[in-house]
Image: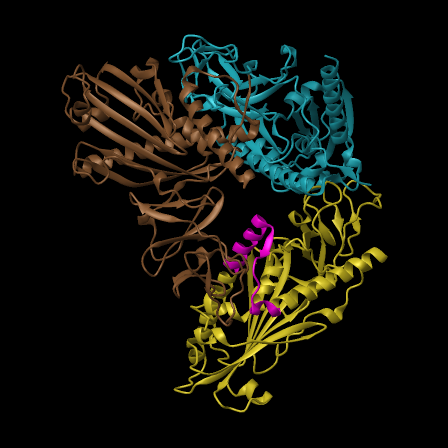
Chain colours: A brown, B yellow, C cyan
Amino acid sequence: MSIEADFTQGFVRNHWYAAAWVAELGERPFPRTILEDRIVLFRQPDGTLGALEDRCPHRLAPLSMGECADGGLRCGYHGMVFDATGKCIGIPGQDIIPPTAKVRAYPVVEKYGLAWVWTGLGAPDHGKLPQVPGYGEAGWSILDGGYQHHAGNYRIEIENLMDPAHTTFLHKETIGNRAAKDVPVKTTQDDKGLSAFRWIENVPPSPLDQKSRDFGDTRVDRRIAFNFELPATSFVDIAVIPSGMERSEENLMHGGLRTFSYKFLTPETAGSTHFFWLHLRSFRQGDSDFEAVLRASLEKTFTEDNEMVAAIQKEQEATGLRQRTALAIDRAPIMALRMIDRLIAAENTVGEAA
Amino acid sequence: MSIEADFTQGFVRNHWYAAAWVAELGERPFPRTILEDRIVLFRQPDGTLGALEDRCPHRLAPLSMGECADGGLRCGYHGMVFDATGKCIGIPGQDIIPPTAKVRAYPVVEKYGLAWVWTGLGAPDHGKLPQVPGYGEAGWSILDGGYQHHAGNYRIEIENLMDPAHTTFLHKETIGNRAAKDVPVKTTQDDKGLSAFRWIENVPPSPLDQKSRDFGDTRVDRRIAFNFELPATSFVDIAVIPSGMERSEENLMHGGLRTFSYKFLTPETAGSTHFFWLHLRSFRQGDSDFEAVLRASLEKTFTEDNEMVAAIQKEQEATGLRQRTALAIDRAPIMALRMIDRLIAAENTVGEAA
Amino acid sequence: MSIEADFTQGFVRNHWYAAAWVAELGERPFPRTILEDRIVLFRQPDGTLGALEDRCPHRLAPLSMGECADGGLRCGYHGMVFDATGKCIGIPGQDIIPPTAKVRAYPVVEKYGLAWVWTGLGAPDHGKLPQVPGYGEAGWSILDGGYQHHAGNYRIEIENLMDPAHTTFLHKETIGNRAAKDVPVKTTQDDKGLSAFRWIENVPPSPLDQKSRDFGDTRVDRRIAFNFELPATSFVDIAVIPSGMERSEENLMHGGLRTFSYKFLTPETAGSTHFFWLHLRSFRQGDSDFEAVLRASLEKTFTEDNEMVAAIQKEQEATGLRQRTALAIDRAPIMALRMIDRLIAAENTVGEAA
């Protein structure tokens, strides 16, 4: 068998993608390439965000080399000013504004500390913004601001994130668990995504578990659900409870350790991805020493992911292939990729009909 | 509207281009790529310069890896020696010199501290060497040796240099002047180039003006002429006089501040340019502190130009476009580009006829 | 005349190529690209070497990112284990091993401190392993471990190594000898390679000769043979004896200085080569100060070769040409290249017939 490389399969466009942490956005305009579009984020005079094509229509100067000034985003070359609808509202030395003096505008909203950009051509669907349970609620601590630039296509990232099996080997120094390597995974699917989960039963707590809560000599049961939300969100939900405890929702939430680990993937190009991570936990609140350890552990884990993803991206480019053999563990990742394929196909069909 | 990118439009070849400052040329042969030709400059035994294709005809070793020796330029691989006409005059271990043992020679002259290379295939026209008024004359101070490598096509550079409007925004910390942003430009043209100039009247002296001469509370009139000389020379002529002073040639030259700022652009490739600058002034002669300030200010300004030019080069490459809208300020730059187009077309027509 | 560039002419595949010094191979798998094949070397549980395609058939992860574990080479992504025949012998979480779960295996042997890989598709011919006279014998000192990465096609390397004439100019600070520049070269050929040699007679000992042995005021005769062994081995044999001494085999071996200098070239890509060098000498045994001087001198010489080879590679790529003129000194290099051409053509003919 031989499956062709699929990093060239394009993007789902009618969605909100994380473009930047709001904390990244200062007074200066901020450039970020998303779905191969060069986009600039900027603050409007009223304090709300704008997002425009990062390319002045005059001589193609990146607008991100300009400034927030004169009531909009001012080009750093000849001072043309654009508002957040993409309309030119001022040209120094010239009264008439030609109708061609405009740039593409992207809908943008702030939520969960992130700036989200709608990359579709039609009206944005606010119902499609990701939902993060626990965010801002009492009893939950948030680690945010996490960003890595990954050198692989978002599809390779999704395969990685929907694949519990790799943690034993790739992340053996952080979250890997040798005991888990032969535990099967159950997969469920709905129209918004899918979930691959497994119970790992009656195992000693991991070093990180032990640091998170003193389990003493107690063994634990651990449920990990790897959730995929279309088109490019990974949500890993981890519950650790003392082995044998009843698996009620209440116990899963408060009987041990509960973690929600989000990764919002934003395709940059066919071969690179913006990797935003957001981590919520129900334990060790306000413990900044623990948070430093946790952040370092997560950064190390995601760096390992990136090293693998980048290597696979190179091999796909070099060989034009994706796989030469298939394994049982491919089930959930392949299901996720098929869902993306269908969404892209649907968008293209609509495009052809229009 | 949508104008295609033009960085692929080629070069005017029948001209002298600045290849190097003479001060850059030591005992070692000196390589520089000009109009995509790899050229090596070297000193002949009589002290005059030679310029050859930088590629030995034997195994294509760069002759610039060799030495000035044995009566010419000696290849560093097998010791073949070439004179400044490109003829091989010695092969170690071999008496017969094959007729194919030759390289292309380029006419080269020294003037204004620069080595100028004629890139045409026909006889060089010495009348086409740039003229620099004031150079070497009493009453003028020279800043020379200025060189930057710019990451854009020479046409993007010329648009930049023929465009007074950008200084307000791109160079706001050095030569920019907010007051100037709405002052119109007049353009005149002859068969050798064109001039875009404007008077900015009754304004306070700029910080640099004030450093250059104590104007006290006097306001000034400033005339800036942006001159273009085919195919790739920019000459900015700046006169600053006390506001209201009669605008006689005598007053413009000696009544205040007069500056001649030359940029000799030498295309390296379709996407890069050698930027040689030469600056003459009628004031603050022999003031080395002032010269250091002036040199730093000019270097900063040209670095800003390069950042913009490089960004635009990338956008032209990425989009295949040059502009999506046109402004009034494009008039002089577009006239300059049209003159270049006509010269290239004329050269190609001659080439086809020959 | 004009000869086309030949760096695109491919490789002789049915041969043993040096892949790594054994000293480079530790507990971790070791990746090296050979003849454009990505290969990983690793230690099997029994201590012998294995060599596999460096690409897991599952998701193309480089196996060199994995570990020597579980009885073979274990992929660092999902833990699939391969033995040295390329067969998958274990998949975590899965009992059935699909027939597609396999990678290409390369025959590999250790000899002369190097790991040699057979890149042909058929059975390896152990008779084709290089022979190094003197290796491991009394009276000979070995300098080994020499490796450089060279940025040129192996054919440009071979031209360089079969070409005594260049040493005068390229290596004038180490092994070059101005007196040698006009001494002709004799060439002999058999079906395994060729030899270009010359006697340089009655010359003062070189600085390195003088450091190697105190010749006092005696002049010397020096025989240098540049040997080429198909497909990519250079063996330079240097004998230095007091001028006028009888040229018997005994005297050449023990009457003065005798050096065997091997370079094992392994094509990496069409534009780069692994350069392994091995140096044997009959003098100054056990003199570590002298060895340090010798190693530095050799490294400098080979670095000079690489600079030239890399420059020529670039010129061949830029021009599509190899030469514009031919010299008498091209005789031996051209003969070597023709032998390689014939071997590649023969391999391709066999391939077509099969």
Percent from the top left, x then y, of residue A103?
49, 55
The residue most toward the front is A353
- Asked if residue B32 is positioned above or below residue A260 in the image, the reply reads below
- Asked if residue C351 is positioned above or below residue A117 in the image, the reply reads above
Choose between C279 and A38: the one closer to the eye: A38
Q: Quadrant of residue A85?
A: bottom left
Can I make out residue B310 in this image?
yes
A83 with respect to C232 (left or right): left
- Circle count: 0
Label the magenta part by its dominant secondary structure. helix
Choose between B297 and B64: the one closer to the eye: B297
| Residue at the image point whose x is 19% and y is 36% from the top | A140
Q: Is residue B311 within the magenta segment? A: yes
| Residue at the image point whose x is 61% and y is 70% from the top | B332
Percent from the top left, x then y, of residue B345?
75, 60
| Residue at the image point whose x is 77% and y is 60% from the top | B347
Query: Magenta segment, which residues?
Result: B306-332
